[in-house]
Amino acid sequence: KFVRQYAFWDKNGSRFVAIGFWARVPMVLLTLVTGVLIFIFARWLFGSRTAVLAVALFSLEPTFLGHGRVVQTDAPAAFGYLLFFMALYVYSRKQTWRVAYGLGAAAALAILVKYSMLLVGLVQAPAFVILWWKSSSRRVIAAHAFVTLAGLLLVINAAYYFKHAPLDSTEPVWITANFPSYGQAVAFGVNALTYLVPKEFLLGICFQIIHNRQGHSASLLGMYSQMGWWYYFPVAMALKLTLPFLLLSLGSACLACKRIITNREFKFLWLLIPALVYLIFVLFSRINIGVRYMLPMFPFLIILSAWLLGQLLEIRTSRGAWAPVLVLV
């Protein structure tokens, strides 16, 4: 792998600047599209003023500005994660065949950009169970779940050009070596699933599991570890986020919880649940290599922060400097 990598640059050294530039252009465009999605989702939930404020916060957020122009999987993961929850929001309000298929396609796009986005399945499955339980047309919801799964499989297979090659002779050996306790079962499962999705996709998932189990060398506050720390990412966010954004995120999350409990404003769950699910997920990650891993949380925190700013702007400044805080609490 590394020999081919060095050979590529040996042959294309004179085009280094051009290759680096054009490789980043799609990343910049995707980051801009993420800003558009933030605007749309914020307007759906809270109106145009919050949407404008959310885009302003997004445009000034240093982590997105820094990583949104780099060829990595984190900014695309933020796009895919937000797109999935937007699709789920639309489906919760308009349960049609087309929207159900779009939900599956959105989940597939999220998974394709980063394997950790498989956690959208942990959200999608219980969401369908809840909708099925509450619906008067349970057969329709069950059929929609099947359509969503079909859309997910279709998009994933299309990304791999519908290739369905079986495992070769070396790949079961690799799987068995890295899963010594149940290697044969994993190899059998992967080989069976190649009829549904490409083996490269499945082997990528296996590699990600192995990588997380083995850990990744990391440092935190003068400490070094191969297996990481459960509190790495919360500390990284506390140190890396700008102080205004950090305070707005914490304040808006607390106030949103209060609104849910006292006023039954359940629309805040569409921001709090995605952020909380992803936070819990990364707490168990042993790959502690930077705050960029937290980017999928940022759009939801940005919208919450924009909502809080909008609430503060509604309060007349003539009431005094502390009046906005007192009125909100």
Image: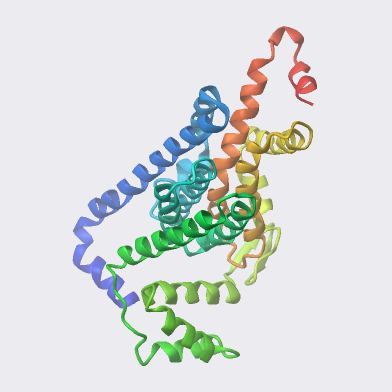
Q: In this view, does 69 lie to the left or right of 119?
A: left
Percent from the top left, x then y, of residue 204? 44, 73
User: What is the x, y in percent for residue 299?
Assistant: 54, 41
Estimate the x, y position of residue 220 in percent, counting from the top left. 66, 59
Q: Which residue is pictured at 75% across the width and 31% down the height? A: 263
Q: Which of the pair 108/240 is nearer the observer?
A: 108
| Quadrant location of the N terminus in the rendered image | bottom left
Does 189 sit above or below residue 16?
below
Q: Quadrant of residue 264?
A: top right
Q: Where is residue 241 in the image (x, y as percent from the top left)?
A: 61, 42
Q: Which colour scheme is used?
A: rainbow
Report the front residue among 9 and 151. 151
Total numbered circles: 0
Which quadrant would the C terminus be assigned to in this image? top right
Please name the residue shown 56% across and 55% down the image: 138
Kindly identify the residue that appears in the image at 52 percent across and 59 percent down: 142
In this rendering, position of residue 289 left or right of residue 249? left
Give the residue furthest to the top: 318
Classify residue 121 by image quadrant.
bottom right
242 shown above or below 141: above
